[in-house]
Image (cartoon, helix red, strand yellow):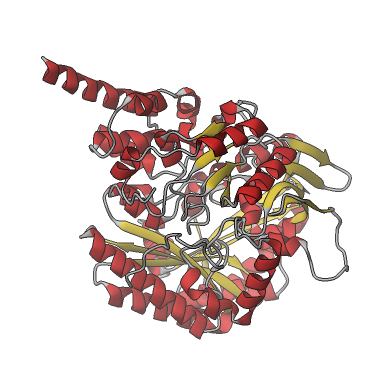
Amino acid sequence: MNASTVRDAQLESEVDASLNRALASIVGANFVRSGFAERLAYARDRTPFATFHFRAGKLPGTMPRSIVMPGSHDEVARIVALAQARNVPVIPFGAGSGVLGGALPLGHEVMIDLKRLNRLVEINETDGTATVEAGLNGGQFEAALNARGFTCGHLPQSLHMSTVGGWASCRGAGQNSTRYGKIEDIVLGLRMVLPDGRTLDVRPVARRAVGPSIRDLFVGAEGTFGIITQLTFRIWRKPEREIGTVLAFPTLEAALTSARQIMQAELRPAVVRVYDAEESRSRTEGMKEFQDRPILGILVFSGSARLASVESELALEIARKNGAVLASDEPLLHWQKNRFVSYSMPWQTKNYYMDTIEVTGAWSQILAMYQRMGEAARAVHPGIHFGAHWSHVYAEGACQYMTVRLPPMDDDKALFLHAQAWDRISRICLELGGSISHHHGVGAFRNPWIGAELNTGLDVLQALKDVIDPNNIMNPGKLALRPRPGAVTLERKG
Amino acid sequence: MQELEQLRFCAFCPNPCRRAWPAAEAAQDEAITSSALSTLAMQVAEGRVELDDDVRAALMRQDMARACRPACPYGIDVPALVNGVIRSLEGKSSHAAR
């Protein structure tokens, strides 16, 4: 089972029949898969690095051993206990929408596809909570809430392509996070299967002061500490009104200063988006307001009509003081129409090497971060595209979301340059005191920088992992935690 | 877009159409999503995967792709593209046999 190409993987027909029979005894034969075509579907996620490999006929990691699809928490627990008894590594799999290799098999793991765990267990309108199984599609969850007059407020670009368990597992953030919070603010409780097969319930309550948060040990653990099977989320009444505003700013500094001042004035926008000149240009083409004010800003306030109106006016005052003018709605409508689809396919189809990198920076460093990262990317290759926007903002800083795109070229050379761009940008981020991941997580692709990001915190995580999962069966090699012997690493040539 | 380019486009797309597949369906595996079918068909069309009986059977599991077709933001008809790849290759092999 050492294939590195798709072609070789088809020629290998090794199947662990004994394991498959044991898995089938838990979930039924219909919910165990081990054919080549079925395993190939789980040999990638949406990591651009994986896409670059797949389109060249190469495997980014390994083929998985088998796929098993449990239909209940108890079945998950029995599968994990079986894996533990046989020392077989496993990976929980939702919709595979991660972009950093968190669900990539690196050592012939068994993939535990959780999408049959997709029941909406309860909506409690009094408490404002919804309890849902981890494998439910995010868009279906939000639609079910909307039908009852509620929203989860967690609306990532991957809404329709992801599962609710995946949201929590990668510690994600939605596009309305500035108002509703990130997933760690939204998850009130969860149910897990630990690596030894035991169940852990973090009972949902508004808050507790009972030691460090057990919940936060698992929100963002990317399946390395266990498998989330059920979650209880905060939910909110759908807003009475949404007020969207498009602004043209004279400079990027003016736009980012406005975003900072809006947050430090304690206003609560649902959406704040600032685009650099590169990203503004395509969204404002032909619009007269942007002729001498090239920076696009989008604000959305929501909630009760009166409150949203007041907050929007106050924010507008701040923006105007920084030189902004109101512009027509086209960029807002374009964003609303396309906010839940990916932008990468036209480029990946044409053999470009497109990737996105999101980091967190303090306001005092954000402009230097943008400038230095752009320079570093352009130094990697003169034909590189570098663009950025800021779409999650705080009183203290913001998420800088960058698109890096290399033109078509020799694959080995491109992978070398791609790794260089990642390395340079990540190092600058750390040098300027930022965090190398705002909401995409770590997966396996960010492993090289986690030691510098977490310093001795990584030792703490490894110590916890060693106690919780001494045989290292649970999504090994991710989050920069120790891989299993013989596992592949994502090859880095930078 | 040409047919192979559409397959590649869908292969690299993260399945926003999947929301159209009911949660109540028993089959929820990744291999039957539109993007997985497109990926497999792309590898077959590009000569990296042999169209054997197992691969053919996998490509014919099109219920989810058919259900998700109306939800494709780009109007791509994955079952038609996949069937086109199968027909094309089977046509070639039958021509070669003559």
User: In front here: A242 or A83?
Assistant: A83
Horizontal and vertical percent for residue A302? 69, 54
User: In front here: A402 or B47?
Assistant: B47
The vertical placement of A373 against A403, above or below, is below
The part of the image, by quadrant, that contains residue A60 is bottom left
Horizontal and vertical percent for residue A141? 67, 40
The part of the image, by quadrant, that contains residue A292 is bottom left
What residue is drawn where x is 58% and y is 38%? A68
Horizontal and vertical percent for residue A152? 71, 48
What residue is drawn where x is 62% and y is 55%? A223
Q: Is residue A253 left or right of residue A231?
A: left
The vertical placement of A304 against B38, above or below, is below
Horizontal and vertical percent for residue A430? 51, 81
Q: Is residue A89 visible?
A: yes
Count of picture labels? 0
Quarter holding the C terminus of chain B? top left
Q: Is residue B72 visible?
A: no
Q: Is residue A166 left or right of residue A436?
A: right
What residue is drawn where x is 66% and y is 66%? A465
The vertical placement of A463 against B29, above or below, is below
Quarter holding the N terminus of chain B? top left
User: In front here: A62 or B77?
Assistant: A62
Q: Is residue A127 left or right of residue A323?
A: right
